[in-house]
Every structure is written in C-alpha cells, then in structure tokens.
Amino acid sequence: MSLLADLLSSVFDRSTRTASDTQWDNRPINELVADLTGNHGEVRGMTLARQILDRYAAMDAEEKRAFFLHLASGLDIAPETVRAALADYEASPSKATYRSFMAAAEPPRQELIRRLNQVPGATERLVRMRHDLLAMAKDDASLAALDLDFRHLFLSWFNRGFLVLRPINWSSPAQILEKIIAYEAVHAIDSWGDLRGRMQPTDRRCFAFFHPAMPDEPLIFVEVALTQGIPGSIQAVLADERDPLSADRADTAVFYSISNCQAGLAGISFGNSLIKQVVDDLSRELPGLKTFVTLSPIPGLSKWLTAEGLSETATDDKIASLAARYLLNAKRPNGAPLDPVARFHLGNGAKVHAVHANADTSPNGLTQSHGAMVNYLYDLAAIAQNHERFAASNAIAASSDVKALARAAEKPDT
Amino acid sequence: MSLLADLLSSVFDRSTRTASDTQWDNRPINELVADLTGNHGEVRGMTLARQILDRYAAMDAEEKRAFFLHLASGLDIAPETVRAALADYEASPSKATYRSFMAAAEPPRQELIRRLNQVPGATERLVRMRHDLLAMAKDDASLAALDLDFRHLFLSWFNRGFLVLRPINWSSPAQILEKIIAYEAVHAIDSWGDLRGRMQPTDRRCFAFFHPAMPDEPLIFVEVALTQGIPGSIQAVLADERDPLSADRADTAVFYSISNCQAGLAGISFGNSLIKQVVDDLSRELPGLKTFVTLSPIPGLSKWLTAEGLSETATDDKIASLAARYLLNAKRPNGAPLDPVARFHLGNGAKVHAVHANADTSPNGLTQSHGAMVNYLYDLAAIAQNHERFAASNAIAASSDVKALARAAEKPDT
Amino acid sequence: MSLLADLLSSVFDRSTRTASDTQWDNRPINELVADLTGNHGEVRGMTLARQILDRYAAMDAEEKRAFFLHLASGLDIAPETVRAALADYEASPSKATYRSFMAAAEPPRQELIRRLNQVPGATERLVRMRHDLLAMAKDDASLAALDLDFRHLFLSWFNRGFLVLRPINWSSPAQILEKIIAYEAVHAIDSWGDLRGRMQPTDRRCFAFFHPAMPDEPLIFVEVALTQGIPGSIQAVLADERDPLSADRADTAVFYSISNCQAGLAGISFGNSLIKQVVDDLSRELPGLKTFVTLSPIPGLSKWLTAEGLSETATDDKIASLAARYLLNAKRPNGAPLDPVARFHLGNGAKVHAVHANADTSPNGLTQSHGAMVNYLYDLAAIAQNHERFAASNAIAASSDVKALARAAEKPDT
Amino acid sequence: MSLLADLLSSVFDRSTRTASDTQWDNRPINELVADLTGNHGEVRGMTLARQILDRYAAMDAEEKRAFFLHLASGLDIAPETVRAALADYEASPSKATYRSFMAAAEPPRQELIRRLNQVPGATERLVRMRHDLLAMAKDDASLAALDLDFRHLFLSWFNRGFLVLRPINWSSPAQILEKIIAYEAVHAIDSWGDLRGRMQPTDRRCFAFFHPAMPDEPLIFVEVALTQGIPGSIQAVLADERDPLSADRADTAVFYSISNCQAGLAGISFGNSLIKQVVDDLSRELPGLKTFVTLSPIPGLSKWLTAEGLSETATDDKIASLAARYLLNAKRPNGAPLDPVARFHLGNGAKVHAVHANADTSPNGLTQSHGAMVNYLYDLAAIAQNHERFAASNAIAASSDVKALARAAEKPDT
C-alpha cells in the first residue's frame, strides 16, 4: 500500500519538523502534568504533552527521579475510591458503575502516558523514558510499580498486530544499518565491511520488527545464513572467504543471531513472533528450504561446569557431551532449564538438535562455553506439541543424538 | 520513509494472503476463548486468535449476542479478588502487590481483545465487532459495560500519536475513494463525477486520518474548499460550473464537510486533531491562506424553532437572526449549546463568525435549518482562550455581527 | 527501489509546479526554434524549450500546420552537405569525418525534438504533438516525412528497456483508472461499477506498460480473466453475477482485451512485449496457471463474408466453420492473414486454438463477426517456432479442430 | 507518484531475477548480432539480446576488441546505398524516399544497440560497454567512430527530461552511499564515518541525477554545505568538530564537490543541469538562501606557474593574485580559459567571485594549486548574460576584487 508509505513518511517529517516549535513553559513540571491529565478538552493537550517531553529530555538524573517519584506517588490509585467504586459496581452493575470502577482502578499516570504519546515521535521518547526508569527501579519499589504501568501500555501499543516485519539488506537506509551494527548483541559487527558481509551476499538475510510510530528504530532483528546442511561452527558461517551460495540452492536457514534493540521495551517479548514470521516468509520465498535451525551460544555452560567442578574435564572431546548434559539436565529451582537461551528456544517449541565442540572459537565463545554451540531446530510440525509439553512440565525435546551425548557425560569415566 | 511503505504493504499483503490458511477448530467458542486468555506461551496464540475471529465472522446476530454475553459475565472482574489485591497493595505497596492488583482490576476480556489483535488485519475486525456490540448494547446494560472495555483499548490503540494524516485526491486509490463516497455524511456524493469535482480541482483538498493497522480504512476526513473570501452558500461552493481557483491565489480555507467513518470507533474523537493538523499543513503549503473557517450546517435549528413556536416567523429575512439567537442562546440543561455541531466547533476553540440565510437550499438544508448555515472561524491566535472559556463556563465566542443578529431576534416584533 | 519512487514523484511534482513559471517570449516561433537548435550551451535551453512547448499548446490548427511545415522544410537535411560529408567519410574514414556525416545526415529537427524533451513533462506533450501531426500528415507528404523523425526518436525513447509493467487494480489511482475507462477499445467500460468488476475480483487482472517520463499515462494495457478451462463467450467472462474464482484455483489466463492508449505512439509496438511479460509474471505469481490464451474478436469476418457472398450462409451452426476458414485461408495480397487481430497474435507466435459461435452477442460483435470469436493460444514452448514459420512463410499454426472446421467450410453443402 | 515507485522496483527486481534464466547459445557472436539486427519480429529479440550481453560480459579484452571491430566495420553505413537513397529523396521527396534515406544513413549498429537495450538492466551494461570501448578507441580511429554511435544514442536516452534529481542523505540505501564514496572525485571520502559527516548534519546536502533504467547508479552528484557567508577554506568546511548550522539559518549554499560517476557517459554533460536544478530546489526549500557559490579547485594553476616560470614567486601572499591572473588571463589557443574547472563554471554562466590562499592545504591542494581555491558565483539574475558573453567571446565575468587581484599579479615586483 503506497498510501501508507506516504502517510508514514509524513509522520516522520512532521515529527522532526515541529520538534523545535515548542514555546518554553516555565511552570513546575508537576503543574504541567496536572494540567495535561486534568485537561478535559483536547485543545491544549498537544502543546502540554510536547512541553513535558521536552522538559523531561533536558532533566538530569535527579530531576528524572523526582519526576518519576511524583508519578509513582502523586498519580497512583486512591484505594478508598477504588473500594467505593467496586462496591457500587458489585451492588449495582451498570455502565455507569463500571465506568467509575475503571476510572478509579487505573492510576492517572496511565492516562498521562497516553496523552504524552499524542505528540509525533513521542512513542520513541517514552520508550527511552522507560529505559531511564528501569535503571532507577532496580532499587526503588515504588518506581518498580510505576514501571508496570509503562509495561502495561507498551504491551498494548506494541501488540504483534501493530508490528511490521521488514527485511534489512544492503539497500536499507544507512541510518537503519548503523543501528544494526550498534544493536548486534551476539556476534559483534566490527565495521561497515563486516556489515556488508552479513547483508549483501545472496546467502544472507536479516529481518527486523518495526513499529509504525518508530520507523527508524528496529525493535528486534534476526540474522540468517542460508546453507546446505546444518552448520556446526559460527566462524565457518561468518567466514569472509566463503563462496556465497545461490539462495535457491539452500536447504537450510540458520538463525545465527537474534538481538533485542530497545532496552526500554524489556519484558515485552518479540522473539517468538519474529522467528515464526521469518520461517513463514522464507518458506514462501524459497521453497527449497526444508530445515530451520539456530546456531546458538550456550552462555551458562562454563559457569555451570565450574560450579559442578567439571571444568577440568571439559576437553575438546568431552565438551559436547557435557554441553548436552547441561542443556538437558541443568535446571533452575522451578524446573526450567538453567540456560537462558535454551529457555527461550524451548519455550518457543524448538528442539535441541545437535551440540558442537569448537563451534565458537572467539574469546567470548571460549570463555562462556569452551567453544561449544548448539542447534535448536524449529520443526513446524512439532512446535505446538513441543511447546505444550515444555509449558506443562518443562519437558525438553531433544534429538536422540543429543540425548545419547548427555547420557555419555553422566557415565563415570572408567 | 520508504522503509515503512514496504512494511505496511507487507502487513496488508500478509493479512489477505493468510486469511484462508486457518484450519477450523470445532470446539465451542467459549473454550477457544478460555484457551487464548489462559495460554501462557505465545506459541498457539496466533492460531487461536484467528480461529476466534473467523468463528465470530460466521456468527449470526444471536450467536454474537451470546458471545458478547459470555465476555460480559464470564470474563468480568472478580470483586473479591480485586478487593483482596487492593488490601494487599494498600497494606504493603510493592511491585508484586501492585502487579496483582492490576491483574485483578482488569477484566480478562481486555487481555482477550489484545490477544485477538495480534492477527494481521484484526484491528479492523475488532472495530467491526464493536460496531455490532454497540447496536446490542443499547438495550442491555451488561453489554454496555463490555463496550467500555473495547473503548478503553481503542483509546489507547487509536492514540493521536499513532494516526497518520493523509491527503486524499484524484491520485488516491479507487478503493479509498469509494469509501469517501460511502462515508460522506454531510453533503452526499452522488457519483464518481461528483467525487472528482471535490478531489481533482486545484481549489479543493481532502484529508483523512488513517491508522497503520487499517491502511484501507479512513477514520475521519474533512473536505476543504480554497476560496477568496468566506462563502455563505454551500451550493455556490460545490457548483460544477465555477472556474477553479489557483491554490496559491486563495486566502481562505473552508472546511465544508467533516465525516466520521467508523461506527465501531464511536466515542473516540478525531475531529479536533484533524482540523488542527489540516490547518497546520495547509498553512505551510499555501502561505497565502489567512482564514480558516467552516461552512457548517445547523442541524437542530428547525426543531428548536418549532419547539419555541417560531417556525412561522422563520422567513428569509428573519432566519439569520433566529439562527444566531439559536446558536448563542439555546442551551442544554447543563449549559452547553443545544446544537451538536456548535458544541463540537466551540469546544475546539472556534468562534461563531457569520450566519447565512439561503445557504443550503437542498431539501435536507431546508428541512433542518430553513436553509441557514454558519461559519465557525478557527483563529489560531484565539483558539486556546476560546476553548478555555468555553470549557470553564460555556462562554461562546462570537463576532459582533452575529451577536447583533442574535439580539435583533430577541426583540419583540412590534 | 524506493529510491526511484521518490525521484519520480519529484519529477512529477516539479513538472506541475513549474508549469506556470514561464515568461512569455514574443518572438516568432521559428526564431525560438532557431535559437534552441543553434544554442550551443545548455544554459538557456530549458527556458526556450518550455517557451516553444507553451506556444505550441496555444496554437490553433493552422498555426500548428505552419509550425510543422517549417520543421519539415526549414529543418530538413541539406543534400549537398550530406553528399560532401559522405564523400569525405568514404575517402578518409575517421572520427572527424564520421561525426560530420552523422551531423549532416540527421535533420536538425531531430535535435530540436530532443531539446524540447528536456523540459519536465515534455515527453507527454511531444507524444500529443505527434498525434496532431499524424492527422495532418495523411494528406501532406512532407509532413509524413517529418513524422518519421518523431517516430525514430520515439522508438529510441520508448525502447522496451525503459518501459515498466505495472498491475492495475482497484488500489490504483483514480486518475489512472479513468484512463483505462477512456482507452478501453475492445469491450467498452460503461461506468465505474463496470470498471470495478474488471479490476477488483480475485479472478481479474489488468497490466499496463508505463514510461517513467509519463507516469500518469498508460501506453497499452491488457485485461485478463482467470478461469478454469478456456471460455468461449465474452459475455460469460464479463458476467456480473458470476462467482469470482479464487486466483490460485485458476488453470487458465484469458487475455480478453488489449488496448493501445496513445495515438501519438502509433507504429511503435508494445503488444508483443506486454503479453510475454504478463505471461511471465502471472506464471510466477500463480503456478497453477497452465494455459495462456486470448478471447479475441474477428473484426474482419463479416466484411469478408459479404465480399465472398457468404453472408447468407452464416447461420449459427455454420459461422464457426466459416470463421475458421476465414482465419486460416483469407489472405492479403502479400500472403499475410487478412484479419488484423490474427496478424498480431500469429506474428507473436500464437496459434489459432478454437473458434466459437455466439461468443460475442453484443451489437458490435454481431455486426463485425456474426457473434464469432477466437482463442489464440500462447504456448511458451511453441512460440518461437510458430513465429519463425509465420515470419518466413506466413504459415499459420492452428489446432487440428480448427483446421477440420475450416475444411468443413470449404466442402460444398450438398 | 507511488505508481512509479512500484513499477521501478519491479524493473529492478525483474532484472536481477531473470539474469540467470538465459540458455547459452553457442553460435559465434557475430551470428547472434546478425540475427538480432535482422530479426524482423520482436519475438526472439529479448532472448538474443540477453545472450549477446551475457556473452560480452564473459569476453576478455581481445574478444571485446574483435567484437567492437566487427560492429565498426561490419555494421557501418554502406556509402553507395546512402548515396542512392539520398538521390532518390532529393529527386522525389516523399515519406518512402525519406524512410529509405534514414535507414541507409544510420549504421545498423545503432539499431543493434537499441535492441540490446530492451533487456532489463541493459542500459547499465551498455554504459559499461562504452567504457570498455572508450579505452580502446584512444588508439583506433574506427573504434572512435563507433563510439560516436554509442554517444549519439546515449544523448537521446540520457536526455535531461528523463533524468531524476534525488537528494542523497543518511537515509539513502547503503548501496547508493557506497557508490558516493567510490565516485567522489574531488575531496576523497575516507570512511563511512567521513561519509556520515557529509550526509547527516543539518547543514549538509547532496543531490544526484539518476536515470530510471539504472536506479542503483548515480550519474553525477554534488555535495553542498550550507553556511553563513562564503567560505574560503575547504578544510574549514569539512571540519569534523564544527557545530552544524540549522539549515534555516544559512544564507549561502556552497557547492564544494561535483563528481561525474559513469566513465561510460563521457561527453554527455549533466553538470549544468544539476547545478541549476539544485539551486532551484534549495531556493524553494530554504528561502533564507541568498547566495549560491562553489568552493572549487584550480587544478591547472601549479602547472601554469611552472610553465610561466612563476613557481618561485608563489608565496602565500602572492598566490591569490597569481591565481586570479591565471583564471582571468591564461587561455587555450582558442581563447577559452586554460583551467578546465573555470571553463565548466564560466560556461554555465557563473562568475569568478573570490580567490583564496591556504584554502586547500591537503597534499593534493598544495600540489595542484599551492593551496589556492576559487569561489564561482551562480547569480540567477546574471547567469544568462554571463553565459551569452562567454559563449560569444570568451568574456569572463569576475568581481572587481578578483580583477584587481589579477592586475596586481601583472604588475612588476619592484
């Protein structure tokens, strides 16, 4: 729809254009907040909202903390009012009593955040605001509660139905690509040349989710290698000197890096939707693809080996077995896998398919997992069942090879 | 941002493409609803949500009512739980107790609606669902309460910050233009030729708000005539035979028709934002524009004249005075103006600028207002103050001419 | 490439924007022409070219004729100069002598046309200029020669490599769609409702060639019906009440109307390229399509029947045989088929596949061919060979059924 | 026009997509050429043309030379035929005789090039072909003549009316931006960081011409700095640490680098059109801009100083005077300025506005001009007259300051 193209470009143009139009309002910020949440008409809302956002942007850390504390205490629910409205609704359920209950049960700071969001470009600024808040909320319970209000609204705004999947490649705008460099969290991108090597070849793909109100900011992205067969070494996948494969000759899509981009969207999960959508889109584009698999780090392995006193044993010929054992058997107190990446992919319905030694020989790979990596397999036919079993009982789907490896690691070395 | 263009086109393509992929699930709809709201992972959510939407689309009116009643009663808040959570939070405010309170105070049907919305194209379907609901809620209090949940979510989703203003013209897609024909609510568009006459000439403009998740559906639109001077007759404005004015020679922009498009978004107001944005955009594009004014109907005039026993007096030379008197003095019990169009524009900060007899000689115009119309003036320098006074005390801004006219109508006819 | 999108939009915007900037230059047009062709720098070229185009646009028919006659005689080649340059080149071939020959052998009016074309929007104006010229050239040999210069340049400018194929559908701009209505030359489109019936249903497609310098003007378009099996009636294909077929269930694409749009591009053939490109694109989009076929008029049939004294015999049960005989055996003096539509499709490498009585029962269909129509089959595997044979010896590819029908028509009615 | 966007994207997609579809045809290339030029239908043209282009792409230098020599000699005009056709036309001017003359006077290789161009993506390949040819034509007169045919067609294809001006900035596709790095010919861009410094700040602009058939290849681009006042040092303009100026506060646009991108388009001039269009566009966007000026190198200065025996005198306090003298007085035999950059800007109607010492202190700047640079002023009111005088008599427009400086340099140093 070209229609949308134009619209959205106009959104963006407008936001940058009008950013500097605001007249400064010298009243205390809390007064502006009161004015914005209390203002019944819409007429001055835009001006007030922009004012507050601009004022916030100019605050130092202590001023921000004071601003947040005001929202947390001054714009909280009033328990007496909630209780009274609830009693009314219970006694006499009606539109009017329900409306009163809804109004009472939602703290006014939620309405504040919604009204701030009417300013063009505000969504991105509110995401950054929550980023600030999260840092402060670690050691302040009232701010932690305030964060729940941001999170509640963001869950609604960043609903899957509003996100847009977008291929990222060497034709993408430089300003998007430099964010891919900045946000890559798994295998660092060193330079624009390195980036080109992941974006331009025929056997590479990258996809990101975007939100229409933040068109310049990817939310999450995944990098994909198209291969023949399942690879067991990230250095081999990323090797500069390899001959790129023609995409229609590939049988396997390897998700070798998934990075969240927005710290201010912590706790709002996009990864599962992203992987499914990419599997879906790649399947349509390249019918030759039969296998969808990750090549994933095992970030908790070394730590666990140390804790178990197994570090000494982790030689090249043993590390795969130990990794398999770790992935299948090491658990958190609640029964979930100890490894965070494992929790993510198994929770999505994937299966532990294969474990490889010497798979990530970078300093980071050697440190965190003695160089071991793992393939999680996304088998569309099995995902729902794998997920159900994992959700119900933490049951881990694994190939017989991996199971055998894990058992081997448990056997005493006689 | 061309980036967005592509994304959004892909959203749309995907929604139409996958619409038919769903496998039918024969379980009772309430079971599917329970499954979707209870499903803790995201894995099966998309499938369930699509299923429920498809099932809903195939329901007859009675099945829809039963579905809504289930949401209203089965997915309501549980007062005891709310009360307990509130007491906990009050006794010991913390992230955990606040989270419990939030969860208890929001009825599960809100989460259901959010989860339904993850399906591509779902937003539009949920807006239509609320349209159905509104019809049934008129005579069912529990459904009226349920509607508040839809409205609450829609207020968040259709936040001004997510809307996109878009010019509509003769280069717009036919599928959008045919919706302009369908939704025009003030001065009906009879044919594509009539439409072209409002979209193509150099002295005509049309703007609409869109939401990125509903790219084919305008939410509200305004039709604008560029003129020299302020017109006093809608027939003159719409005359086919007039010579179109070159846009850069116009000094006045006349908003002669504003139409809401989505019955399912009733109660979510876009008009004030739309007018302001259009004033802003037109000012930038055409610096010669000095006056922004409406040419508006007075829908309640004839009815009021009858009620007041003044119908007989409403001759051509008296009707303007009577209309002025009606606009300035006829009030609802709460002190607001009786005329709904007046309430809208005055609430936006506009001023009653001029009243015209013989201004709408269509059958509808003669019936509703004896042919009288009114210009509301949007004077950027005065909007905020006008609005404040109107909001505070229902004070109506009016030109001295209109005030004099109104006074004339009050004088006894001696 | 979104890049291009923007560019081209800017081309178009600019052309409309600057159209009115030109200052009027009162010198005789021939002086302006001399100035433009003689002007060695580029500096004033744009201004002069716009001036000439604006002056031309304001001319009446006699002034236009005078303008053309000046180009024809005043800007013709100078035979002496050509002869001398040719002799030089022959005597001493070099870059310099070849350059002189090229300069002499090309009449200055070609350079004039090229320089006129530098004005934004000029290409379309030059196409319309040739349209005017063609009408006058019918009875004026010198203008007929001048037309060859226009045609020569247009062949270069409208090279297949510069054309862009574009689907036309209900999302296309209204200003493009109204041109489809205007240019449809085979089965008239009566109304926007009729148009929607050909553009919107899932089993309809339309494609047009555009030139980037004329983005609002289709050059040629084809309307396609997706069907199961090969249809034998245009009224059945166009029937309003039919249930649209889901596109992926179709096995046949029927080209039921091909229309050239630009009279000023007469003699520049786009049809063959268009059909091939559409076959190619549809094959990729809808792999279920196995048959590509036309449902074509037989415009010369009735006339031929009359000429042959066969009109009386042309009853419903005989007309198909007679049509087959006409298509296969009626020839022009040079051996090519008498029927112009047959010449076009057979020249493209198509095959006469089937002939139908009662296939076009419209007044026009009954008049021109007693209601008979024909399917030409585009079989990708046979096109090259069919074309070669036809080009070499006017050999007509036909199905055995059609051949049998044709033979039947030759048998004496005993 | 979003329409065009889509089309052009489809052009590009198609070209890459179908590149690999070609079946290899083993006949000698000259046979394929004969087939393509002789082929009267269009049916096999696309296949043959693609074949020839693919074969050419695989040739080594000697094969390419042989291919070109075949075009030069085997597809040249036939003088006897031209002579006879000319005589016929002279004797009896008619459409038929003119057509025969046109056919005879154009060598068949021009038609070959046009037919090659029908393949998607061919234009770019033909531009590269001419690049190869130009290298070989330096020492081969017959190839130099052949080059005139390419040039003749390219002048028609790359007509100003077909070009699209496009801003280049940090939102542009990386694949375009890396070409800006590669093609920058005046002040080298060292890295993506350096590029960002020229593309992203508010006081920088870049514009390029594109051709719709080569959407990924800029033809020429200009880099612009927005400043307050006219700068006299390129290092100051490019300084990293400067504070970017808000664009609406600038009064001067400085064209500090203009680079042609396509060696295969040598001799086809875009610079004058580019500068005028950019002046026009910037004036509209930023009404505060009053002065349009270059900051240009003086590439021939050092060489001239050496030739004149003035190198020794070229100290910092003398170099500006000497540069002024060089620019105003040093001439080629034909009376044109000796300096090529001066010829370009003066030919466009610019004026020598100011000369600066220590203006380019890079090694290259010191070597070619002892660090001196010059501002050429584009004064819209004076351009036409400046151009006319320069074109008529090589008269150089210069400020009185520069004239005085030049005179100073002529005075004997007593």
Image (cartoon, coloured by chain):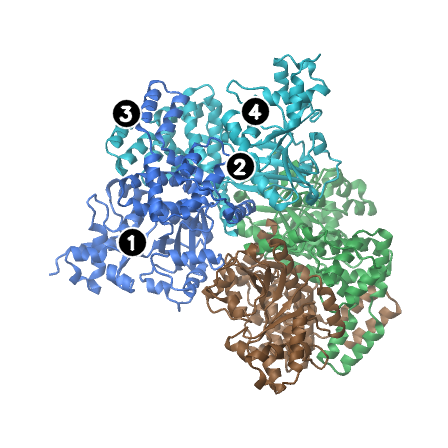
Chain colours: A blue, B cyan, C green, D brown
Which comes before the other along the chain, label 2 or label 4?
A: 2
The residue at the point 69 percent across, 53 percent down is C18
| Image x and y of residue B288, in percent | 66, 44
Which label number is shown at residue B340? 4
Q: Are marks 1 and 2 in contact (CB under 8 Å)?
A: no
The chain identifier of the residue carrying mark 3 reads: B
Residue on which the image places disc 2? B273
Local crowd size for mark 3, using a 10 Å CA cut-off: few (<14), some (14–19), many (≥20): few
Q: Nearer the viewer, residue B394 or D344?
A: B394
Q: CA distance from mark 1 to mark 2?
A: 54 Å
The location of residue D291, given as percent across then percent down, is 63, 61
- Whether callout 2 and callout 3 share a subunit is answered yes
- Pick out the residue farthest to the left: A414
Above or below residue B130? Residue A396 is below
Type of residue at label 2?
Answer: Ser
> Could one spot residue A125 in this view of the protein?
yes
- Measure the alpha-carbon separation of dots 1 and 3: 48 Å
Which of the 4 quarters of the picture holds residue A56?
top left
Real-space CA distance between mark 3 and mark 4, rounded to the nearest whole angstrom: 42 Å
Q: Nearer the viewer, mark 1 or mark 3?
A: 3
Mark 3 or mark 4: whose residue is earlier in sequence? 3
Chain at tag 2: B
Residue type, label 3: Glu
**Which residue is labeled 1 in the image?**
A353
